[in-house]
Image (cartoon, helix red, strand yellow):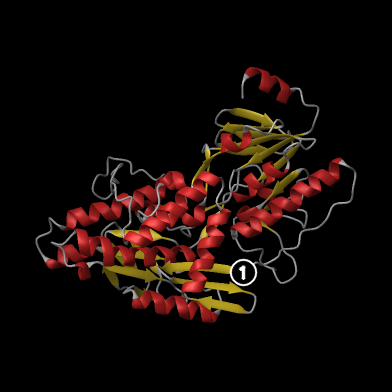
């Protein structure tokens, strides 16, 4: 924003709406407030929107990072009443109507929290320190470097046991992220490892999917879960149910029953928690790590502050524990809040939120996916094509859609994961205690 544009923005005689977080909800909200009688300021510690459903494909060398990222300024630039600041929000002062950041304080008339969610380690600091996670592009690149480095390191191992430990990949959490990661790694074993690391016996690479529940994709239908389990097992993924990981030191995984497993890579996908901010504790639901909001997304007891998506806990109808922490729910909440803000500006009556469940889907590998839509439960190639179409169209920007489409086309025609580059080596804390491990 040049000085003239900044002066024009500052001179707008409208209430100031500050949006914290540029995920699905935040980005949808600012798009719908373009040209509205509000001054809108988007705050995010990154300068880009990340399409999280495809992070696992960056982590497994199928897509480049810029294929699923979209700069905020490219979206904001044509919007005369919207500005962006790259800043990390550290607290909120609701009495003073101020947002505190690492670059100063910003005043607001209306505050919208769309901070999303982070990885939930359930208080286990040892696992949090050593395990890998997948919530950002930086973390996806760490995983990509890690498994490629493990392939290279295994070539130098002198015995079978050492090679197996080097090539033992464990994923905790059999939700969509865990299932998709496990399937992608199984395809890498069948293609990249077998063809390009011929000195290694590819069967020594083991992929473990661990979950404390009794089936994969617990929130899907039983039919979809059964499809997914069969696909995983057919691809050679070891699935272990009813198991709870209690400790990981970078070399050894310990389970609640006392059993152990050698593994140098543990990826934690066992849960998420809302990213709440200091200053709004009165509205927090402690166990859920989410803000208690009404049907209009406004925080209970904190007027003028709203929460959307993963960080919002709204109860309605059968959703007595809140809506699922998925993109469609976040986007729907953002759409209604934007419409309600427009109604508020016009003095019209506000409308309450009602969630429309559009179904769930997950992909496991080539021609293998599951889809739940109402009473329809699909598996196989048709579900796989549906998954590809929905995710392609949901990407932000034509360039990203084209890049992803071309990346997928090349991968599925050539049977190769194309981005097998160790650009930024991942350094394990267990090996270099004095070196801080990059976490994205």
Residue ID for mark 1: 359
How packed mark 1 is, by other alpha carbons closer than 10 Å (few <14, some 14-19, many 20 or more), is: some
- Judged left or right of residue 5, residue 128 is left
Quadrant placement of the C terminus: top left
What is the secondary structure assignment of the residue under circle 1?
loop
- Judged left or right of residue 131, residue 275 is right
- Who's the residue at 57% across and 34% down the image? 73
When asked about the image quadrant of residue 361, the answer is bottom right
In x, y percent, where is residue 265? Answer: 30, 59
When asked about the image quadrant of residue 241, the answer is bottom left
Q: Name the foreground residue: 340 vs 123.
A: 340
When asked about the image quadrant of residue 186, the answer is bottom left
- Who's the residue at 37% across and 62% down the image? 412
In x, y percent, where is residue 287? Answer: 59, 60
- Who's the residue at 62% across and 20% down the image? 2
In x, y percent, where is residue 34? Answer: 72, 38
Q: Name the foreground residue: 32 vs 118.
A: 32
Q: Name the foreground residue: 96 vs 349.
A: 349
In the image, residue 37 sits, relative to residue 319, either above or below, namely above
Does residue 72 appear in this view? yes
Quadrant placement of the N terminus: top right
């Amino acid at each position: 924003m040049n000085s003239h544009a900044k002066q024009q923005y500052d001179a707008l005689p409208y209430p100031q709406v500050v949006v914290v977080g540029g995920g699905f909800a935040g980005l949808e909200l600012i798009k719908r407030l373009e040209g509205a009688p509000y001054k809108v300021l988007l705050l995010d510690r990154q300068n880009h929107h990340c399409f999280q459903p495809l992070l696992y494909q960056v982590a497994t060398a199928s897509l480049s990072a810029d294929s699923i990222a979209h700069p905020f300024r490219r979206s904001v630039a044509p919007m005369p009443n919207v500005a962006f600041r790259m800043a990390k929000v550290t607290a909120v002062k609701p009495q003073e109507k101020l947002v505190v950041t690492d670059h100063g304080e910003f005043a607001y008339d209306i505050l919208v929290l769309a901070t999303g969610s982070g990885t939930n380690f359930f208080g286990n600091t040892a696992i949090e320190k050593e395990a890998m996670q997948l919530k950002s592009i930086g973390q996806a690149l760490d995983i990509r470097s890690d498994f490629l480095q493990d392939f290279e390191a295994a070539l130098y191992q002198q015995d079978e046991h050492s090679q197996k430990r080097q090539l033992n990949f464990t994923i905790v959490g059999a939700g969509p992220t865990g299932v998709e990661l496990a399937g992608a790694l199984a395809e890498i074993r069948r293609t990249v490892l077998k063809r390009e690391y011929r000195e290694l016996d590819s069967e020594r690479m083991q992929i473990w999917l661990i979950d404390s529940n009794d089936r994969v994709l617990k929130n899907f239908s039983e039919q979809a879960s059964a499809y997914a389990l069969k696909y995983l097992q057919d691809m050679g993924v070891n699935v272990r149910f009813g198991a709870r990981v209690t400790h990981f030191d970078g070399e050894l995984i310990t389970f609640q029953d006392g059993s152990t497993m050698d593994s140098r890579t543990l990826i934690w996908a066992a849960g998420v928690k809302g990213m709440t901010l200091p200053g709004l504790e009165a509205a927090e639901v402690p166990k859920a790590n989410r803000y208690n909001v009404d049907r209009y997304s406004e925080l209970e007891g904190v007027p003028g502050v709203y929460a959307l998506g993963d960080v919002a806990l709204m109860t309605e109808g059968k959703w007595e524990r809140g809506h699922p922490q998925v993109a469609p729910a976040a986007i729907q909440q953002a759409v209604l809040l934007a419409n309600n803000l427009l109604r508020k500006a016009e003095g019209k009556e506000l409308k309450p939120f009602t969630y429309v469940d559009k179904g769930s889907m997950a992909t496991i590998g080539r021609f293998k996916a599951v889809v739940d839509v109402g009473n329809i439960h699909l598996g196989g190639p048709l579900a796989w094509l549906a998954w590809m179409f929905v995710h392609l169209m949901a990407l932000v920007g034509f360039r990203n859609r084209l890049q992803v489409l071309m990346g997928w086309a090349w991968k599925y025609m050539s049977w190769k994961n194309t981005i097998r580059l160790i650009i930024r080596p991942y350094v394990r804390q267990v090996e270099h205690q004095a070196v801080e491990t990059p976490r994205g």
